[in-house]
Image (tube, coloured by chain):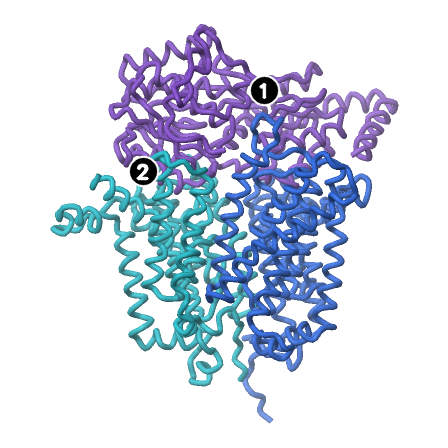
Chain colours: A blue, B purple, C cyan
Amino acid sequence: MIRLQKRAAPSALMGYLAPVIALFITVLAGLVLFALLGVPVLDAFHAFFIAPISTLYGLGELGVKAAPLIMIGVALSIGFRAQVWNIGAEGQLILGAIAGSAVALALYEVDAWYVLPAMMFASILGGMSWAAVPALLRTRFNVNEILTSLMLTYVAVLLLSFLVAGPMRDPDGFNFPESRLFHDAATLPRLWGGTRLHAGALVALGLVVVGWVFLTRTLLGFALRVNGTAPRAAGYAGFNQGRLVWLALMIGGATAGLAGLFEVAGPIGQLLPSISPGYGFTAIIVAFLGRLHPVGVLFAGLVMALSYLGGESAQITLNLPLAITGVFQGMLLFFLLATDVLINYSIVRKQPRPVS
Amino acid sequence: MVFHGSLKQAAFAIAAVLSIGVVNAQSDDPTKVGFVYVGPVSDHGWTYRHDLGRQAIEAQFGDKVETTYVESVPEGADAERVIRNLASSGHDLIFTTSFGFMNPTVKVAKDFPDVKFEHATGFKREDNVSTYAARFYEGRSVIGTMAGMMTKTNTIGYIASFPIPEVVRGINAFTIAMRKVNPDATVKVVWVNTWYDPGKEADAAKVLIDQGADIITQHTDSPAPLQVAQERGVFAFGQASDMSAFAPESQLTSIVDDWNSYYVERTAAAIDGTWASTDTWGGIDTGMVAFPEYGVNVPDDVRAAAEVIREGIIDKSIHPFQGPLKDQAGEEILAEGEIYDDGVLLGMNFYVEGVQGDLPK
Amino acid sequence: MNETLLLTALTIITAATPLVYAAIGELVVERSGVLNLGIEGMMLVGAVCSFAAAHYSGAASLGIVAGIMAGMLMAALFAFLTLKLQSSQVATGLALTIFGIGVSALIGQSFVGIAYSGLQPLPIPVLSEIPVLGRLLFNHDVLVYGSFVLVALVSWFLKRTHAGLILRSVGDSHNAAHALGIKVIRVRFMATLFGGACAGLAGAYLSMVYTPMWVENMSAGRGWIALALVVFAVWQPGRLLLGAYLFGAISILQLHGQALGINVPSQLMSMLPYLVTILVLVLISRDRGRIRRNAPASIGQAFHPTT
């Protein structure tokens, strides 16, 4: 029999080794899964993990896909450390996209440097305003933010549908539900020719650094990191619970809103009825997969993004149905999450006490 | 991007100069046809019908083609990547089967002038981008006629997805045909704001029946409304596929999407080099809009009337949007004998007389 | 008009029942101190397995059993990862949903387009003969009755039984419970399995009663609504029933409003169930003490016996 024994201190070595072990187990499990389904195993792994990032364009796409996940993931991980359960980042992202697009469309005739900054400012306000509702209701009326932030996501989706089919519709677009294509002044510059990599990737990296500085160099960050329970941590840093709730939700809302703008002003280039394939929800996994640490979130976001690109690539090169790629992605996540146990616990063999 | 395009061109150039053997091998290479789907192939609705078209290509051309599909591609930033990856992985012909893929398709097409693109339900074309769609509203004329004749409560329930021109056009075509045979009948529309949520579609069907509708029709994807109709003993029309398995007594007929012959035709053109950019809006006459056998409960006179409309639309003696037409306020909007051109139909965003409620805008 | 009201009430019951099942299971899970965000995934696997079993065997009862088993199997996977291997509950739950969507689609490939007659109503003798009330309350399928019985049982279990007391104590403070000699992990494992069984039942209700068929992703986000309803209910079974029926009722009534021709954009009408739920929660959340009494204090926190 084997059992888990708590380590005296978290193992730094395992912190790095655990994901490697997870990948190894995933390969083993993948062997079984693909063999069972009659898929050539080596081709499958190549399609999932190598092909998507074997070109410059593919690497750029990894950044495009990972940027919103990392941005929101970093912000949410701070909130989750403070035990503020904002699971409505998706709605805040949509509001950010709406607000930013509204500015882009209002300044449609304007070709000036300030269009893009104005859009970014608006999107941050948009995301924050949507997150302010759960914050207000939690601090003033004691309403649990899980429910409000989640419900407001559905409201945001419908609001977007309403606006795109009505007030924000392209006047020359035969009444189809989409906005005008943004002008160059309202579109993010690309970082690298031949890719779609945009400024959002830099912002994501910047947020990782800011998040890291916050956690290691500020009193509140230190308190949140060292002290497990949020209220006590907040008290230690001179914060009351209410301010902590506001802070967590505002950071989350602002970041998600900005991420939403980067989608519409970056790879999409217009406002559509659906602008996010669930980034706000996936970022929750990313936050925890990254162990609520900015650097961890960076890697988790990249892995998560790669798993989506790999799913597409496997469909294209091997004709694997999406169902299989979903199962594989789920397995990968399970293993990554499960092997984290090795950081805090060691596996020991349960044996009868040696006779001495 | 330019990078990929030039690389591909270079590959072709090298192949051409190397040897005849290589050139031969190239001409023997199967033509690769890619599909980008907005839903899962097993949605039994929109995407499922496109995938039948893909299978028809495989059945028709065998070893001469290779087909690929990517399903459930979100209409956002991801679409462009999927289309581009198909284009750069040697696909010769790519079908993008949802309106939301329009701008990404055009964007990628500019970087891959040698690859042929086919975009469904959009309006932007390029030298290497065709558009295609089906005149499903013609089918709605046929079922509207049947509904007008068969309703006893003079109330028809219409389950609609999103207020886009395609759906509004269907509602109007249905209503116009219905009022021609039954001027007292009206259409109640419920918008469920989803293409696909069986539970919600079933709820909407129940609500409409509870408010007096004795015939249900839908512009959403799942067979759930037909199941409800069957259970409640009212009639209904299927959508996209023959859904009689779900409503053996209730389904009167269905408007079936049939892309098979179009897909086979366009693939043949791509293979023999005659492919050129076109705009196809196919109706009943092209087979894109098809009907299964009439349901067991369709009386002979209704069947005959439906056939008259169907054949009239095919031989162009009947147009679904033929004046005189009135708006909801009863004002004439189209004079006797005139018909709406395709431009008006494409962007339709108003209701005609006989539809209850206001059009959400 | 009475007839319309009655029929509307029946539609609301159908819309609310899957929410009741999924939410009452999650309520028990959360009361034990575990947060499982994988309801949607468990529901889908439950739905496809119950459809498959009912389709192959022709027996609705086997379908229900298969749904329960499938939900429990998914929950066991979650419980193993989170309780034995201490993985993050939030992330594991979300991964369970991704996994469940994939697995259910894989299993369901051969069932698309197949019709199933559905679970038949089971009128309760004599009572179902009562005018109006009989049809409203006593002429349903077994799963609708089951949902009411289940809520009553859970309520009784949590409030009145020793085992319920143990479950709550584990949720409130696992360290204190452990000190009292309670096997925390075992209690949570069982609670999680119960949640899986309920989510599986919710799925079975979808694919056998609500819309008797299988299509991918047919739960369409109901697992998330169930999650919100547990919060709405402040972890109390009675209020959960209220929340599920409130949400179901607004969803159906807004459709009625549209069909009556109310001049409001449909997207705004469709927002109503979410907005009303928030509003009602605001109105009933004033009592801080009550919420604190019921909210499981150690929810979402990993537990490992230190000795």
| Element under disc 1 | helix
> How many numbered marks appear?
2
Quadrant housing residue B100: top right
Q: Position of residue B60 (x, y in %)?
A: 57, 20
Q: Residues within 10 Å of mark 1 (few under 14, many from 20)?
A: many
User: Which residue was labeled with disc 2?
Assistant: B206
Q: Amino acid at mark 2?
A: Lys
Q: Position of residue B19 (x, y in %)?
A: 86, 22
Quadrant housing residue B140: top left
User: Which residue was labeled with disc 1?
Assistant: B264
Q: Is residue C182 placed above or below C121 in the rendered structure?
A: below
- In the rendered image, the residue lying farthest to the right is B17
Q: Position of residue A110 (x, y in %)?
A: 74, 37
Chain containing the residue with disc 2: B
Q: Residues within 10 Å of mark 2 (few under 14, many from 20)?
A: many
- Mark 1 and mark 2 in contact (Cβ < 8 Å)? no
Q: Residue at x 62, y 33 (%)?
A: B101
Depth check, front residue: C185 or B15: C185
| Residues flagged by tags 2 and 1 on a common chain | yes
In this rendering, the label closer to the viewer, 2 or 1: 2
| Element under disc 2 | helix
Of callouts 2 and 1, the N-terminal one: 2
Depth check, front residue: B138 or C99: B138
Q: Residue at x 17, y 49 (%)?
A: C134
Q: Amino acid at mark 1?
A: Val
